[in-house]
Image (cartoon, helix red, strand yellow):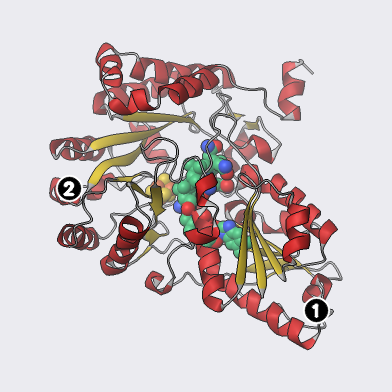
Amino acid sequence: MRVMIINPRFRLPIDTRTTPHLGLAYLAAVSEERGDEVFLFDADVEDEPITEAVRRFQPHLVGITANTPQVKSAWRTAQAIKSAKDVPVVLGGPHVSVLPAESAQRPEVDVVIRGEGEPAWIKLSEIIENAQKGKPTFTAQDLLDTKNGLLDGLLGISYFTTTNEERHNPDHPPIADLDTLPFPAYHVFKMDRYTNLQPATDAIDGAKSFSVMTSRGCPYRCTFCSQSIMPIKWRARSPENVLKEWQHLVHEMGAQEIGVLDDSANIQVDRLERMADLFIEHKVNHVPWIFVNGIRANLATQELLGKLKKAGLKRTAFGVESGDPDILLSIDKKIDHDTIRQAFKNAKAVGLETIGFFIIGLPGETEESMNRTIKFACEVDPLIANFSMMTPYPGTKVYEIAKRQGRLLLNDWEDYVFFDGRARYELGDMTAELVERKWKEAYRRFYLRPHRIWMTLTRKDFWLNWRRTFKVAWKTIFPKKEKTELRKLMEAGT
Ligand code: B12
Ligand code: SF4
């Protein structure tokens, strides 16, 4: 069977870099394992219009990914596909997992697969293949026709039947053994067209940096984080399985740098220790790697971090979020400031570089609490401090709070990016003006300290990337106009 897997066009307003999509690389891998012919169409790097690609490839099934700012582009892509061929179109990814009915009810979308996608995607492929064997004129409508009962037992999907009945089948259980998954199928991507294979590592454009996920899920449910979409059950690949992928990336793909994308990689300390031992024993520790998304500070002992450093770890991130104790408590991060302080100390003591993630504008914030966040960032003083303006994504507790008790300042999914210097909601005394001012102040106060200026100017990475750094800094200060109609009306004073 021919399957087409699509990343619809979407670029951050601030960034022109492109990067292959790991989730789609996994879907492509399981499809190939099933024996399907896969066409990976990444609209960010393709020259050919999607309609022509569909006419040429004649897929039997199409899957499109969608995070929140990408979902409208996913719908437009689905419409274009349907105009070229009557083929079942499936949407998956974080946004549609939270709001499945919104997409499933659209005429250009047939099925939504919620959450971790591989099992339902494979089962749906089998259903369609078998149905097509029995009926060569099979259409997407046949799939949704309850008389055929094709989708009845398929877990993890949402759809509207031909008689417009809304159906949400129960969730698919999380994949129990991640070692059963094949490695991401990078060979289906046009790898030479990406400017940046792993966006959060240091290597400059065109370098061979790859992403790896060694565990999935997160046992925590922080109120601002979209991870609540994914299974709460944390599952990890075995160190041996991770080593195999690492060896493949280093020896066959020529990886110069690896970014580990896990949400909470260090939940099982002995697993990471074993992984470190294996990297050293099998001599893949010369390739630097980074925990780009943060590890749990409460489990980041000096002993563990020292071992990981020997295994090639160059830098680790910690999600600090707030410098204010009450706010930290209110977001369910389940951590305190002394533990975070100690984690930064441990990392620095073993010679690791650090990244700190901070949020400006969490519910309940005041000018004082935001000041505490800036002060705490300066105190723990990571190599990279990232201050995000709180963007309430659907499915999070903060979204519910902002919607019910506050005022959302966006009503277009395409505005749900957090790099453009605009506050996304107001709540009580926390005005957009205050949040925007403190966000800019955070960057200024953190990076314009004399020792930081000196540190930045003496880093090789800065000079390798200086054009982009200036561009990003410029766009942060002078963001492009956003699309939200509501915002335009507000600014016009209506
Ligand atoms: C790496 C990453 C990035 C990278 C690369 C993104 C990429 N192209 O892959 C960069 C830095 C560019 C990035 C940017 C953004 N990101 Co991001 N990112 C991630 C991160 C940390 C890992 C993604 C990943 O590879 N996951 C592993 C794979 C296996 O999972 P997956 O991609 O979700 O795919 C699985 C399922 O979702 C599903 N699935 C996905 N697509 C499809 C399609 C079909 C047809 C099917 C059947 C199934 C399916 O099956 C897949 C396999 O199980 C996630 C957090 C996370 N843990 O997932 C956040 C995350 C996806 N990002 C998020 C956000 C908000 C953004 C930004 C909007 C932030 C911003 N700057 O404003 C931008 C959007 C950029 C864009 N162009 O789309 C949110 C999404 C929330 C939401 N409601 O959409 C997440 C969940 C983080 C979070 N916890 O809040 N991101
Ligand atoms: S912020 Fe980190 S720890 Fe909290 S829910 Fe998200 S991924 Fe888990």
| Position above or below: 329 against 435 | below
Q: Residue 39: horizontal and vertical position, in percent? A: 63, 62
Q: Residue at x 30, y 13 (%)?
A: 449
Image quarter for residue 251? bottom left
| Position above or below: 407 against 104 | above
Where's the N terminus, which quadrant? Answer: bottom right
Q: Residue at x 58, y 24 (%)?
A: 422
> Circle 2 is placed at which residue position?
301
Residue 146: numbered disc: 1
Residue 418: numbered disc: none
Amino acid on which the number 2 mark rests in the picture: Thr
Task: Mark 2 or mark 1: name the one nearer the start of the chain.
Answer: 1
The reply to whether dot 2 and dot 1 touch (C-beta < 8 Å) is no
Q: Residue 80: horizontal and vertical position, in percent? A: 80, 53
Asked if the beta carbon under badge 1 is closer than 8 A to the nearest atom of ligand 1, the reply is no
Callout 2 secondary element: loop
Can you name the residue that lies furthest to the right here? 163
Residue 172 in view (yes/no): no
Can you name the residue that lies furthest to the bottom here? 134
Q: Residue at x 40, y 56 (%)?
A: 218
Residue 345 in view (yes/no): yes
Q: Residue at x 60, y 48 (%)?
A: 67
* Towards the viewer: 183 or 71: 183
* Towards the viewer: 251 or 203: 251
For residue 288, side relative to residue 92 (left or right): left
Q: Residue 94: horizontal and vertical position, in percent? A: 57, 53
Image quarter for residue 405? top right
Can you name the residue that lies furthest to the top here? 450
Q: Residue 463: horizontal and vertical position, in percent? A: 35, 23
Amino acid on which the number 1 mark rests in the picture: Thr
Callout 1 secondary element: loop
For residue 334, side relative to residue 110 (left or right): left
